[in-house]
Structures are given as C-alpha cells and as structure tokens.
C-alpha cells in the first residue's frame, strides 16, 4: 500500500513538472505607430505601424502601411530606417522580396538612422510600381549575441523609425516617422519547452514540498 502511494505521488509530481515545462514563453512585443509626416499630401495619420516581435535571439519586424499608402523610393527616404542600441552590427534576413539591407541614412525632417531597409525596383517612383507591403524581416546581432525588442532605440531627434511612402493620390511621396511605442504581451510559439518564469517555479516548488510532506506523514504513520 505504501509503495502504491509513493508511486502515485511521484506520478503526479512528474505530471506537474511536464505541464510547467510546456508553458510557452511570454514576451513583451512593441508596436510603433507611424504618426509623424513631412508629406503635405499624405493626409492625416496614422500612416502605418511597425511591430517588433521577439523570435528567439532575434527580432521579427513587420511594417504594415495604412490602406491607400505604399512604400516609395524617391531619394529622400527609404522603406524603413531605424537604430539599434550601441550602433551594433546587425544582419537582416528573410526580407520581403524586393527589399534590401542598407547602411546608415538620413532624412531631411526626422534625423539620421544607423540601419536601413530600402526598395529595389519593387518600390514606386510613380503609379507604375505599386508596393503596399507589408514589409517583414528578421533582425539579428552579427556576432551571434541575443537581440531583444528593447535594442531598437530612438535617434538624436527622438524618432525610432522613418519610412518613405507614396500618398493616397499616388503621385506625391514623403517621409513619415514614429516617436512612440506601446508594449503588448505575446507568446513565442517557437519556444514550447522553455525555462519557466519565477512565479511558475514557486508554484512548482510549493507543489513538490506538499507532496514530500504527505509522503513523510505516511511513512511516520
């Protein structure tokens, strides 16, 4: 009878451990709004959004323009300009077709940026080339170290991102930018088995201590 109780306790302890280890990791993603504009014909914002999602040791970036807007290439801006903390060397992978990684750039209105993604022939100079996006890519540290959404920082003018877009009229292009960001909680589905958070570890420890206490009482009895 005693052996049966011990086996039962061990079974439930293993089930508890397995359930905790299967809890997906929760990360704080950040969404920026393209809320600033130097384009007199681009209408009223928001002009789009930039979503930064943690993807292991990298960050998955998605730029979605508002309906009616398109990425442009006019020489006064690029598809997306941004800064990484410490001006670290990065690599952009899994870029949307037609977009390329570039180095440091600057805009007339929203300041300079260290890193750039720009359009090749995919972006319009007129109505003949339409590219409403979305644009997406993965940013990683070139030295292999971990990168987080917090590594994206603002420039000396207080702007986190800038983007060259074509306005709803399909003729006039301008640069829009973002100086804000809102954190949202999301789950990294690529990390099924991960290190539990501290609160979960405390619950696990309490459960195991309770099982050990029950076992001691039965052994004493």
Image: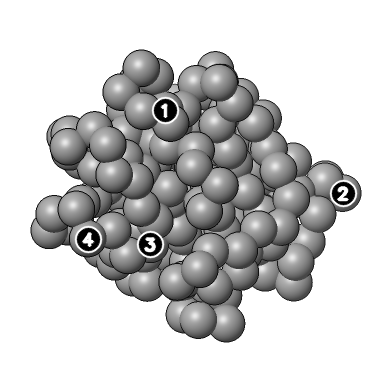
Q: Which SS class for mark 1?
A: loop
- Percent of width and height locating residue 58: 63, 43
In terms of sequence position, does the residue under pointer 1 or pointer 4 come before the other? Answer: 4
In terms of sequence position, does the residue under pointer 3 or pointer 1 come before the other? Answer: 1
Residue in view at x 71 percent, y 43 percent: 102
Visible in this render: residue 20?
no
Residue bearing mark 1 = 124
Give the mark toward the camera: 3 or 2.
Answer: 3
In terms of sequence position, does the residue under pointer 4 or pointer 3 come before the other? Answer: 4
Q: Quadrant of residue 86?
A: bottom right
Q: Is residue 108 above or below residue 75?
A: below
- Percent of width and height locating residue 37: 29, 63
Residue bearing mark 3 = 177
Residue found farthest to the right? 143
In terms of sequence position, does the residue under pointer 2 or pointer 1 come before the other? Answer: 1
Give the mark toward the camera: 2 or 1.
Answer: 1
Residue bearing mark 2 = 143
Visible in this render: residue 39?
yes
Residue in view at x 36 percent, y 53 percent: 174
- Kindly report the distance in space between the C-alpha atoms of the residues bearing marks 1 and 4: 18 Å
């Amino acid at each position: 009878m005693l052996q049966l109780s011990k086996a039962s306790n061990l079974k439930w302890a293993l089930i508890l451990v397995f359930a905790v280890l299967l809890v997906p990791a929760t990360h704080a993603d950040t969404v920026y709004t393209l809320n600033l504009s130097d384009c007199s014909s681009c209408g009223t914002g928001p002009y789009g959004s930039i979503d930064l999602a943690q993807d292991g040791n990298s960050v998955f970036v998605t730029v979605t323009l508002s309906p009616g807007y398109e990425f442009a290439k006019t020489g006064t801006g690029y598809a997306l300009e941004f800064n990484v903390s410490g001006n670290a060397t990065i690599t952009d992978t899994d870029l949307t077709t037609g977009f390329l990684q570039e180095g440091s750039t600057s805009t007339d209105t929203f300041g300079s940026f260290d890193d750039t993604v720009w359009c090749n022939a995919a972006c319009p100079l007129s109505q003949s080339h339409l590219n409403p996006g979305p644009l997406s890519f993965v940013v990683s540290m070139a030295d292999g170290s971990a990168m987080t959404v917090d590594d994206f920082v603002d420039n000396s003018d207080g702007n986190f991102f800038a983007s060259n877009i074509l306005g709803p009229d399909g003729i006039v292009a301008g640069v829009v930018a973002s100086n804000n960001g809102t954190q949202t909680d999301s789950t990294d589905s690529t990390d099924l088995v991960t290190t539990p958070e501290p609160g979960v570890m405390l619950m696990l420890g309490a459960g195991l201590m309770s099982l050990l206490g029950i076992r001691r009482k039965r052994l004493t009895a």
